[in-house]
Amino acid sequence: MKNSIKLFSAMLLITVLFVGMASGQSLEERIQTMAAKNAEFYVNPLATAFGSGMNSGWFHSAKPHKLLGFDFGARAMAVTFPDEQKTFKVDLSDLTFSETFNLAGTDYNISLNPNDIYLDRTAPTFLGDKEVVDVSPRSQNEIEQMITGQLQDQGIPDLILNHTDTQDMISEFAEAFPVFSLSGIGLKALPLVVPQAAVGLSLPMLPIKAEIVFRGVPEIELSEELGSFQFFGGGVKLALDPFIPIPMFPVNIAVGAYTQKMALGSVFEANNTLLTLMAGKDLSLLLFGVGVYGAVGMESSNIEINYEYMNDEDVNDPLNGTAIKFDLKGENKFRTTIGGRIRLAVFNISADYTMGADNVLTAGVGISIR
């Protein structure tokens, strides 16, 4: 049983979010060589896409279950994201490319702007193409010309400038500019799967008709590298149509509030919330039923990232081992959902489409007794 839960959890989130499809790199490994600002740019689209997906699938009807009615099953989401979430501009403003040349007893200070060295700084985000993109400096010859120009502006004599030692120093400095290599996971859509259960709290003879919803898996240890994984969430749906003073009101109307939290070791923690107003209509004929539903909602998503900065290219980098922590807020704000469902005896199949910061196609299957 434990192995089954572990396998399901891996299928649930870990494989997609934290393991690169080609390189096998974890999320922490991908951002470990990035300063905080670029790590934020790289991961931020994930906060929006993850929030869009995890805020989906909470309901498949605007009508709550009757008292002790329930359903249990799984929800699968496919989150699509626009092209602008697949790339970002690498920020090099924190880098300093400066050097002091002591030539013939005189100091000449060289300072190069990173934006003048790296002309094309476009790189994939975590959701971008899996093909590695190199953010490269200008050619060595061009950089040498820039250094030479600064030396000439400071009045260096041609005899000293053309000396072999000076040319060697210029060449050595021009060779020192690093290449930044980045890649994404290369998916057209971000797939997510969650187990979910709901139970009715509707009270006979009273207008209060509600249900509570649970989703998640117990905390488990995935691996030494990834650490423990935990995921849980819940919410409540309350019917509003019983409070409308119109007999036999033809449409089910309800309001729902949902929240959830997912954490992977100490590296990644996500929190998502959804407040939604839903409406729909269910028709039931003994062993067969159909329903349609729609909803508008307000949502939010937040991801907290913790990692240690490591520069493998320079073991003497004073920032090596520095703990970096930052919070990312997704662009999730408003969403609109439309969907339908079919019931065959106790088996329920549903599908809906959500439009928001990202678009989400959700499919659900499970056992339902309303």
Image (cartoon, rainbow, N blue to C red):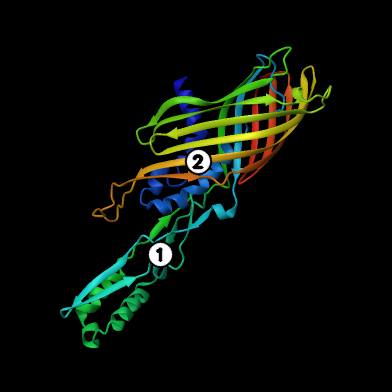
Q: Are marks 2 and 1 in contact (CB under 8 Å)?
A: no
Res. 268 image quadrant: top left
Q: Which residue is mark 1?
A: 136
- The tag on residue 307 is none
Q: Nearer the viewer, residue 151 or 33?
A: 151
Residue 153, how many percent across, how many down?
31, 83
Q: Amino acid at mark 2?
A: Asn
As drawn, the residue found furthest toward the top would be 205
Q: Nearer the viewer, residue 147 or 256?
A: 256
As drawn, the residue found furthest toward the right would be 247
As drawn, the residue found furthest toward the bottom would be 158
Residue 190, how many percent across, how many down?
56, 42
Indicate the quadrant containing the C terminus: top left, top right, bottom left or bottom right.
Answer: top right
- Mark closest to the chain's N terminus, 2 or 1: 1
Q: Please give the name of the residue rendered at 77% of the width and 18% of the height, measured from the top-left corner.
A: 287
Dot 2 surroundings within 10 Å: few (below 14), some, or many (20 or more)?
many
Res. 74 image quadrant: top right
Residue 143, how many percent across, how many down?
35, 74
| 188 sits left or right of 263 in the view | right
Dot 1 surroundings within 10 Å: few (below 14), some, or many (20 or more)?
some
Determine the secondary structure under disc 2.
strand
User: In the rendered view, would you say 195 is above or below 13?
Assistant: above
Q: Is residue 369 visible?
A: yes
Determine the secondary structure under disc 1.
loop
Q: Please give the name of the residue rendered at 64% of the width and 21% of the height, measured from the top-left corner.
A: 211
Q: Amino acid at mark 1?
A: Ser
- Give the alpha-carbon distance from disc 2 to disc 1, as whole Å: 32 Å
User: In the rendered view, would you say 117 is above or below 45?
Assistant: below
Q: Please give the name of the residue rendered at 45% of the width and 29% of the height, measured from the top-left corner.
A: 230
Q: Which residue is mark 2?
A: 302
